[in-house]
């Protein structure tokens, strides 16, 4: 059992500690890095020893945060995890630290409570939204550098204020960060208008492979291993390509199949309207949420397509039945 | 000469009038329609006669605003233009009204001052940002319906808070509209994740035609008349495709060529970094801003490409020279 803290209590504990190691999750995104970097800068401003540890390399695009990385220069006395919902998300290299996390600051409702103490705000759109308040409570000035890191977390986790997790408080926090000097215009260009040439090739292939089913209510695209290799795209760059089929007018279910190095297909299911992505994924041995779910299937492309489309059809029929029952 | 009003004065005049006709600009976007719809609803709440006139059809995606359109049901006594920077932007059907606009509410610094009286705030990211304040001054409650219209204006004019016109005040206004009940999540899906199947085809062709020049510092794509016809895409849906080449990593100048029905090529120039789009466009007989400019060229595809690329090269050389002079 983890001890549930108020944010004031969390701030108090941080003030009392020194030699603080900040852990981010593996495959780091803008929120875990931005939040970790901001906390680190705030603690350094309080003249403490502090540094950030992530088991994976920090993507080059986040270089502007000038993160103080932990390189064993001192022995950690207090360990804080930011934006990490469960112990399995730390990654292998974090093994020496993952079982002795003193404090976890997170916004995932699914947080497993692995830390000794936790501050959880599942209403926050991003961990960075919490960190803005924590910086205040630490009595540290919100400098332009801190504001850049925190804006990065909020903007990336909300798809630049487009996703449904965006709340009024998210916008108010963004306003505050702009007032504090965040370079929002430059950051938006860097974060949201910066696709690699490889990614552009992969997108072209995905559009070439796009097909419609069930009177256009389902759009499906795929990338074979050969196509992924040909495009030279990094796997993580394909992540947000999975939203493409769903964003087409009239499409209720968008499917993206990505062949993995071992030959299996990773199936990403995105839905709008009544269709439930989780129901489709569960029938195929996977899981997720109503709007976004997934599974992994062995077999060739034709078999995989057929299996997925059969479940999409079943879900459409289920929804029609539910609608009839309501009437 | 137009009379410059404060927003309080503008509100006062509206309160004193009845039978108010609201004019939007032609090729209407979310801001002119959202602002016009909100003003109309506010005036109706004050029990005035009011209706909206636009010389072009209102796109079906904006149907949720349930706009009260003007159909000649009464004779206008007071005419208000919203988000219209110049008289040429009203469109042919607005001719009976365009020369007798009593009040203009706008956020374009380039507003020509065609109206008898004008409230201009060039700092506002959208006309809707001004309208939120005007609704307050009119003493009308910010209902969820009004908030939907006003959020639409702000979100569409800022590319969902991504463009450089987004200010702290823009985010504060968005927070206020969410508090008032704007259905932000549904609106974002409708406004930003809703590309037509035709548009998807056009995007595929644009990616297939994409080419890189000058070590990848310039990306150029084109759509011939034949390709546009083949895709069946509506010309207005191709507008935001012009930002595609510029969003590729390492690209300083993005060029999009769209062949027009008469055979000429519309050239869209988008820049990042030091390159100046306006300088390139001006050498080709066009104009615009530093980040976005354009021109129209007669000639076949090869000639057009060669002419544009020569000017891109000239601009790269000019920038290098400027840089050397600085050192």
Image (cartoon, coloured by chain):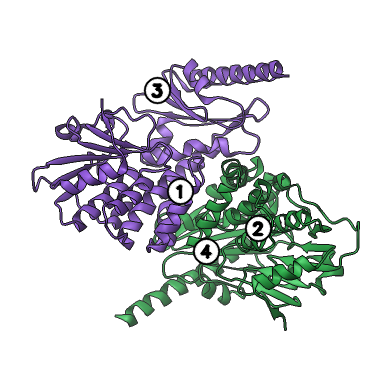
Chain colours: A green, B purple
Residue A31, numbered label: 2
Q: Residue at x 86, y 68 (%)?
A: A77
Q: Residue A175, percent across and down? A: 52, 52
For the C terminus of chain A, the quadrant is bottom left
Chain hosting mark 2 = A
The residue that disc 3 covers is B264
Is there CB contact under 8 Å for labels 4 and 3?
Answer: no
Q: Residue at x 54, y 65 (%)?
A: A269
- Judged by depth in the image, the label closer to the viewer, 4 or 1, is 1
The number of numbered discs placed on residues in the rendered structure image is 4
Q: Which residue is situated farthest in the left direction here? A: B74
Chain hosting mark 3 = B
- The reply, left or right, for residue B25 in relation to residue B298 is left
Determine the CA span between mark 2 and mark 1: 22 Å
> Front-most of B224 and B164?
B164
Label 2: element kind? helix
Label 4: element kind? loop
Residue B170, numbered label: 1
Chain hosting mark 1 = B
Determine the CA span between mark 2 and mark 4: 14 Å
Are discs 2 and 4 both within one chain? yes
Q: Residue at x 63, y 75 (%)?
A: A110
Chain hosting mark 4 = A
Determine the CA span between mark 3 and mark 1: 39 Å
């Amino acid at each position: 059992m983890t001890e549930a803290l108020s944010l004031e209590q969390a701030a108090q504990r941080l003030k009392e500690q020194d030699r603080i190691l900040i852990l981010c999750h593996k495959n780091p995104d803008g929120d875990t890095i931005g939040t970790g970097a901001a906390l680190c800068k705030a603690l350094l401003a309080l003249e403490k020893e502090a540094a950030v540890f992530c088991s994976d390399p920090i993507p080059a695009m986040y270089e502007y945060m000038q993160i103080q990385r932990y390189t064993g220069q001192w022995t950690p006395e207090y360990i804080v995890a930011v934006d990490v919902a469960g112990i399995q998300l730390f990654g292998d290299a974090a093994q020496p630290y993952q079982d002795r996390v003193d404090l976890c600051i997170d916004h995932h409702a699914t947080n497993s409570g692995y830390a000794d103490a936790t501050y959880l705000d599942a209403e926050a759109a991003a961990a960075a939204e919490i960190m803005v308040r924590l910086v205040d409570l630490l009595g540290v000035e919100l400098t332009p550098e801190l504001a850049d890191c925190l804006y990065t977390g909020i903007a990336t986790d909300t798809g630049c204020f487009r996703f449904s997790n965006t709340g009024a408080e998210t916008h108010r926090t963004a306003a505050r960060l702009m007032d504090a000097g965040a370079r929002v215009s430059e950051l938006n260009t860097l974060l949201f208008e910066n696709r690699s040439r490889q990614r552009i090739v992969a997108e072209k292939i995905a559009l070439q492979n796009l097909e419609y089913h069930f009177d256009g209510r389902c759009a499906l695209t795929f990338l074979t291993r050969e196509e992924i290799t040909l495009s030279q795209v990094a796997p993580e760059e394909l992540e947000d390509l999975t939203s493409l089929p769903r964003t087409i007018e009239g499409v209720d279910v968008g499917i993206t199949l990505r062949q993995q190095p071992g030959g299996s297909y990773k199936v990403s299911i995105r839905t709008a309207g009544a269709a439930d992505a989780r129901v489709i994924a569960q029938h195929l041995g996977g899981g997720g949420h109503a709007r976004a779910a997934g599974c992994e299937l062995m077999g060739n492309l034709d078999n995989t397509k057929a299996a997925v489309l059969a479940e999409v059809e079943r879900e459409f029929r289920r929804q029609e039945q539910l609608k009839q029952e309501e009437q």
